[in-house]
Amino acid sequence: MGAGLLLFIVVIYFAVLLGIAFYTSRHSTNESFFIGNRSSKWWLVAFGMIGTSLSGMTFISVPGTVGKAGFDYFQVVIGYFIGYFAVAFILLPLYYRMKLTSIYTYLDHRLGGTSYKTGALFFILSRTLGATLRLYLVIKVLEKFVLSVMGIPFEVTSIVILGLILLYTFRGGVKTIVWTDTLQTTFMLLALIVCVGFIIHSLHYDMGTAWQAMSQKGYTRIWQTDPLSPGFFMKQILGGAFITIAMTGLDQEMMQKNISVSNLRDSKKNMLTLSFLQGMVVFIFLSLGGLLYLYGMSKGGVFQNVLVNGKMQMQFVLNGKNIMGDDLFPVLALQYMPPFIGIIFIIGLISALFPSADGALTALTSSFCIDILGIRRKEGMTEQQQKRIRLIVHKTFALVFLACVFIFRHIDNGSLIQLLLVVAGYTYGPLLALFVFGIFTKRQVRSELVPIVCIAAPVLCYILKQYDTKWLGGYTIGTELLIINAGITFLLLLLSSKKGRPTEGATS
């Protein structure tokens, strides 16, 4: 398939996004940018958030994990389902009752200004790393399979894509993203369904025989019952639940869209609908992974031991090339399937990319402007002055994204979904602990110790993770890293706290 044709499709796709952005950002204000004037439709937000919560990481990495781990990632997804209920019935009522624009304003009300800014800074760190990991993965695939053929380097690709994201988000913010995410989620899901249907048809299966073939290879295995394994089902489910609470309920990007819905009842509908839809979509992605390996085998692919980074590892090799992990889907779609599947893959890929990147850029701008700079609380600052600061911050974060993408290019280990979960475990733990401390205790933190505690806990977790099997009798820490990190942070906050609560007085 010609790279020029694929590039043309990408350009057309961007043109559609820019058209939507132009239409939805007319007469936009700072209130439109931050929370969409609190007028978003819950069903529209729920559908669009599928793309945001899954992203290009799911589109590329999740199918690739099936060859080694089967469906055990679905254990984490079951935990996600539990976490969404906690967000809907514990956190959303709190946010609506306080009429927050930034959810971290709660920490200001409850624990004081130092905790507020510490929590916001941990979100900024977490979302920046998570969003740029996802962004890097998709840019890597576009560069490797489409643009490098035309002699366009990775750096140029990154700059152009971030420039285009900046172009369609800098005016409308959440008001625009609610609509662009819906469009992009639609394309992503269509690409997923078409690819699954093509493989089943090309292998002369029906749904039943396809499932049977995957089961015979061990791809549909879900449950891990070894308590010492990082994939043990209880660890995965609990880890998934707390990952959702932290990465959705305590994440300004995700909550910014939820609180743009006009009332709490509809916002809960959005959250619960998202939980069911996300579970279904991830299950289909895992099924796609099993089908991709079966399709690769039909083209001569085999599992064999390969030297990777000085160690022998079982890899999936096709025509002499290792395509295990993140390379599996793009290699098969673009090199071994008909051209129309390659086109659909590229559309699905870029559709999976932008809901996470554009939303993150908007949420980071909102959090920095509101939580760190405090532009909504400064008396005498006009709407135009706020807008000027917001645009400067928005462009600055685009440059930060670009720098992070370049850094990840040099540390890529071939399968980034696990790296994303590890990053979340270290960075969201202190944020989770601050909210838990505020909601479930009546004690007051010692403000001067909060930043020290929130830095010390991840450091202690890192040391523990390096020696877990040695110190814990063979036990390996997995997705429960987030829980351990939050637990250590909470304990340190509790030990250093005092009786009483600060006066609530911050404004949202």
Image (cartoon, rainbow, N blue to C red):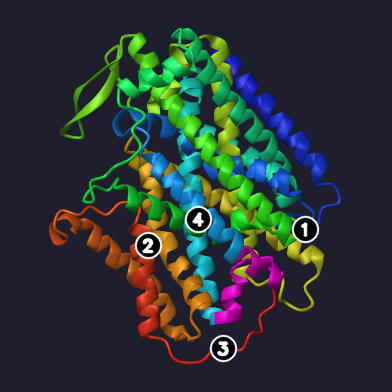
Q: Which residue is mark 2?
A: 483
- Residue 308 horizontal/vertical position (percent): 21, 31
Proximity of marks 1 and 4: CB atoms separated by less than 8 Å: no
Q: Which residue is mark 1?
A: 262
Q: Which residue is mark 3?
A: 502
Question: Mark 3 is on which residue type?
Answer: Pro
Question: Mark 1 is on which residue type?
Answer: Ser
Mark closest to the chain's N terminus, 4 or 3: 4
Residue 107 in magenta stretch: yes
- Marks 4/3: CA distance? 29 Å
Q: Is residue 125 above or below residue 358?
A: below
Q: Secondary structure at mark 2?
A: helix
Mark closest to the chain's N terminus, 3 or 2: 2
- Marks 3/1: CA distance? 30 Å
Q: Can you tell which mark lies on residue 83?
A: 4
> Which stretch did the figure color magenta?
91-110
The residue drawn where x is 52% and y is 14% is 198
Question: Mark 4 is on which residue type?
Answer: Gly
Q: Secondary structure at mark 1?
A: loop
Query: On the rendered structure, is 225 left or right of 260?
Result: left
Mark closest to the chain's N terminus, 3 or 1: 1
The residue drawn where x is 50% and y is 27% is 142
